Amino acid sequence: MLGFLIAIILALLLTVVLPLVALSRAAAARDAMARLERRIAALEDQLPHDRPAPRPSDDTSIAAASDDRGATTHPTAAPTTATSVAQSAPTSPPHAPATPPRESTATRLEARIGTRWMLYVGVAALVIGVGLFIRYAFASQWVTPPLRVAFGGLAGALVFLAGRRAVTTGHARFGTTLVGGSISIWYLAVYAALNLYGLLNAVVGFGLLVSITGLAAAQADRLRSQPLATVAVVGGFGTPFLVGVTTGSHLSLFCYTTLLLGAVVYLAHRRDWPSLNLTSFLLTGLTVPVWHARLYRPDAYLTTELFFTIYAALFLWVLHRMRRSSHPQARWVRLALWTTPAWYHLASLWVLTPHRLAFLVYLIIGTCVGVFLSVRREGMWTRLLLWAAVAVPLFDWADSRPDQSWLVPAAVTWLAVAGIHVAAQVELIRRVRARLHAADILLVPATGLGLFVGLDTVLAPSRYALTGLVPAVLAAAYAGVTVAVRRLDPRAARHTLSVTVTLGVVAVAALLEGAWTPILVATQAAGMVWIGLREERTWLRGVGALLLAVAIMRLLAIQFDPVPAAYSVILNRRALLGFFVVAVLGYVAWLHARTAADGRQTHPVALATAVVTANVLMLVPLSTEIYAFWELRATGPRFGSNAELIRQMMLSVTWGAYAAALTAAGFRLGYAPIRYLAIAVFGVTVVKVFTVDFSQLDSIYRILSSIALGLLLMGASYLYQRHAASAPEAES
């Protein structure tokens, strides 16, 4: 059924859409040629020997006659007389060149309908009529299946000969359209003989379809028709699916696709058709997933990856050849081909992730190649994207907890990826000796902290993990990198030093397992931010921000610990830790605000980040405490099953009330980020009420949640309206 649908879509594309595109382009070229001919005729009319003499008026005739008489009687005085006449006569504007009459809108519309749309509709009607007739004949059992196929082949041949005749007689546009229609008819005939009637085996059908594709490509090259070449490319990629993609080996399919891509690239380069490369690129991306779903076998991952590499190399070579092309379509084709590394990476992960050793080796080799090319071209953002593209799937794989035999290879992979990036950074500093770019400032801590998190994830469940050992060793390594970099660029050494300090703090915090970890890290972060603001050291504030991020992550991990039986709401470890970190964030925000008030360097982004993060974190302990309170009472006789309903309602009311309070505070302080956060919290609350609450709560609780949320939203709206009404008064 899928093959039949593909065949129908292919027929419509080949018969109607692509020929129409060809006709449109041909008509545009004809119109341009006509305009050029009219322009040449207008320029010829301006020549003196071709311009008709203007009919002289009475005054002009008299002046001309007197000039002629003066010239006859006094030959030597003719120039003087002409000069005086020219001086005495008023200056007249030069004769305007004759312009061809502009075609009216009705004329252009008529020409467009007659030359284009009537042809388009006629071809479409012809194809539809022939299809309906064939369907009727088949339903009436007028002819046998072999005769049906033969009729289709004969009809395609007649249409092809008619198209070639039209081309030789000077009707190239009409003839090319008929040739494209004949190709589609042949495709349908072979498909019917192969899949509907079983008259051909797969090998013969595949050979016939390939022959039709080759004929279409040859005709496109001979007729210089890019739409017909597109027909050939679409038919070539559709051939395996028309035959049946579940038959045959994957190796033969990949070899065929490789040869097809090579032929397409050659034809596109020969005729300077960049869009043909784009068509093959898109069709390759569409056919691979279909093939993977139907024919892929896990044991063929190496050959699959080999051909993926060949495809990527071919398209990258095309991109390299088109880098200086001036073709109007080249820009868009280059933009599409720039996504080749991303598609290749996703396809490789798709195939290699189940095979652990190949997966790890691919990540190391990909990192080496990508870093080498980025360093050679000094592509800073390319290295950052490369690190993210490798680290994210490696994190996901490590989080799946591989067995003990794969812990050492995973750790080696993490060390290799991070080491390659660090070596590249040092090499760039040595070669360029320039100020670090924004990508470098992000990549340095991402590499160090990502390495720590990756190693901790991999080694935590094993005997190799020692408390505080991994961050301590990494801190020592980055200290050595800091010493080496400082000799080349002291400014770059500050960033590696920040990673060193962060890893050292993490190592100390790991030794103080439990509630002391976020307290220690948050306190040190506040101190570093204070020093950075006081001394105007940006890198110290950056280190403080990183430490705050570590404290927040540790706090969030503690917030979702299981609730013990003996649990005191609010007066417990995780709630007090949450309030402490919120207080530290508030202190950091106050430091930034005071610095701005003193007239020193302002940091509005850091201030807004601290304020918003503190308010978001305030909701975390509030929500967890409500959740724990009603979880403990769900087993009691008083509330029972109603505890869950009341909990959901209280969460919604708490979030809405907090958002209303943020709105009031935002208007009171005149600080927009708080109001934006309030709007976001209101949005989350509304989504929760109309999804979770309405699906789980009883009618009474739905009513209460809706009423409470409505009142809170109305109150926030009143505040906004009041602010809008008072704003003109304040301005006046």
Image (cartoon, grey):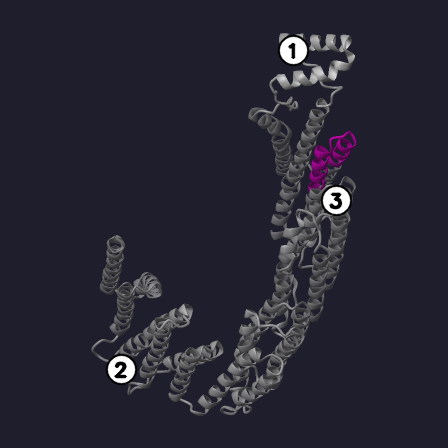
Res 241 → quadrant = bottom right
- Amino acid at pointer 1: Thr
Residue 429 to residue 516: above or below: above
Res 713 → quadrant = bottom left
- Amino acid at pointer 3: Ala
Question: Which badge, 1 or 2, is on the more N-terminal residue?
Answer: 1
Is 547 magenta? The answer is: no
Q: Tell me, for residue 569, which label it has, or none.
A: 2
Residue 109 to residue 658: above or below: above
Report the front residue among 377 and 198: 377
The residue carrying pointer 3 sits among few (fewer than 14), some (14 to 19) or many (20 or more) residues within 10 Å by Cα, namely many
| Residues at marks 1 and 3, CA–CA distance in whole angstroms | 69 Å
Report the front residue among 64 and 128: 64
Is 172 magenta? The answer is: yes
Pointer 2 and pointer 3: residues touching (CB < 8 Å)?
no
Q: Along the horizontal axis of the image, is 149 left or right of 351? A: right
Q: Along the horizontal axis of the image, is 258 left or right of 386? A: right
SS under mark 2: loop
Q: Along the horizontal axis of the image, is 620 left or right of 642? A: right
- Amino acid at pointer 2: Val
